[in-house]
Image: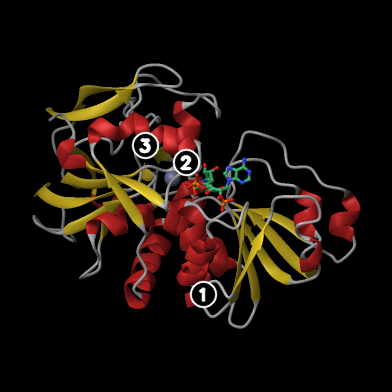
Amino acid sequence: MMTTPALSVTAVGGPFVPTTVSRRELRADDVRIEIAFTGICHSDLHRVDGEWGGGIFPMVPGHEITGVVTAVGEDVSGLRVDDRVGVGVIVNSCGECGPCREGRQQFCAAGVVETYNSRDYDGSVTYGGYSRGIVVREAFAHRLPEGMELANAAPLLCAGITVYSPLRRWGPLKDRSVAVVGVGGLGHLGVRMAAAMGAEVTAVSRSTRKHADARRLGAAHVLAADGPDALAGARDRFDLILNTVSAPLAMDDHLATLRPGGVLVNVGAPQAPISCQPSSLIDGNKAIAGSMIGGLAETGEMLRFCAEHGIGAQVEVVDARSIDTAYRRLREGDVRFRFVMDASTIGK
Ligand code: NAP
Ligand code: ZN
């Protein structure tokens, strides 16, 4: 066992306190990673705030991890010491069930093991990336493409794959009209990726404050969603809507902006039911869908796509002492567009 400095919350709502966590001795197919950066995802906030229930405390969140391999187990063949890698939301799956064999490990029939707040198959609780180091199976560490900055790459491991996967599934997007609703950690990457896939992108944000940024990220159009009838001018406009909003969405208003046959994909995950009028779907053969992160192979594909198109997250780097402030600002929507923690400041 090795211990590593970390930040944990001991009860719903925080605050964070410095702590240490144990990391297992390397098994044959494990790699040890010195963490450089960890993104602060809104899912971490939902979890810490107890919105999803099922919290295991003390909790060390963090599932947007980048760093450098510092040791490898004896059977590891694809990674070496000093390789730059990323770890996302999942750190284990059975590898044998239908979903695992199809490359959709996030739906593992034996129960996927998430990077934190999860129980691994040996019964141990998982602790995430708000720490200096982590040990994971080789298969769950993604080699980062050359030249990708560790800080800007970290959010790709959750936010990036979460928007990439549905954009691919509902594509090809070339010359299609795509709305990305919510320009936050996920949304700003959604705008960049959809634009890189050739879509005509509209960024839908609550106010006009992020409009200039959204255009710079690749949006051809911007819309302010707040206010009565704000979306009225956008009826029948989109083939695909990617909803990344962390709060409940006015479904009927947004469905009205889809063209016939259009799809609204939810990746935003507030703990609240989705409701709409049946006629909002019937009139135009529209569909509501969902999407959860992505599998291992697709995550690798996403990283290569981002490298090819020069896509990384726009980040604000914070140190460990500022974590509670970062959480407050994330609750208030005051971040452009992702906080990443410099993990080397943890325990100092
Ligand atoms: P984020 O950075 O906080 O961005 C969320 C955006 O939603 C905000 O920037 C804001 O965009 C909009 N928003 C926030 N509160 C709102 C409100 N009350 N009304 C209207 N709009 C609001 O969060 P994130 O990290 O991108 O995560 C977004 C959601 O995706 C979270 O619910 C998270 O749990 C979920 N998620 C899902 C998956 C998955 O696998 N499906 C993976 C990761 C995250 P504007 O300022 O532009 O309006
Ligand atoms: Zn996340």
Q: Mark 3 points at which residue?
A: 326
Of labels 3 and 2, the one closer to you: 3
At 44% across and 50% down in the image, what residue appears? 105
The C terminus sits in image quarter: top left
Label 3 vs label 2: CA separation?
11 Å
**In screen coordinates, is 322 left or right of 249?**
left
Q: What's the colour scheme? A: secondary structure
Q: Is mark 2 within 8 Å of ligand 1?
A: yes
Label drawn at residue 232: none
Residue lying at the far top of the rendered structure: 11
- The mark that comes first in sequence, 2 or 1, is 2
Q: Name the residue under label 1.
A: 195
| 3 or 1: mark nearer the eye | 3
Q: In this view, does 93 lie above or below 208?
A: above
Q: Which amino acid does label 1 sit on?
A: Ala
* Residue 173 position in % (x across, y down): 59, 77
Sequence-first disc among 3 and 1: 1
- The residue labelled by disc 2 is 42
Residue 343 can be seen in this image: yes
Rendered-image quadrant of the N terminus: top left
Circle 2 packing at 10 Å, graded few (<14), some (14-19), many (20+), is many
| Mark 1: secondary structure | helix
Q: Do the residues labelled 3 and 2 touch (CB within 8 Å)?
A: no
Residue 88 appears at what percent x and percent y? 35, 49
The amino acid type found where label 2 is placed reads: His
- Determine crowd level at label 1: few under 14, some 14-19, many 20+ residues with C-alpha closer than 10 A: many
Q: Residue at x 17, y 29 (%)?
A: 5
The local secondary structure at tag 2 comes to helix
Q: Is mark 3 on a helix, strand or loop?
A: helix
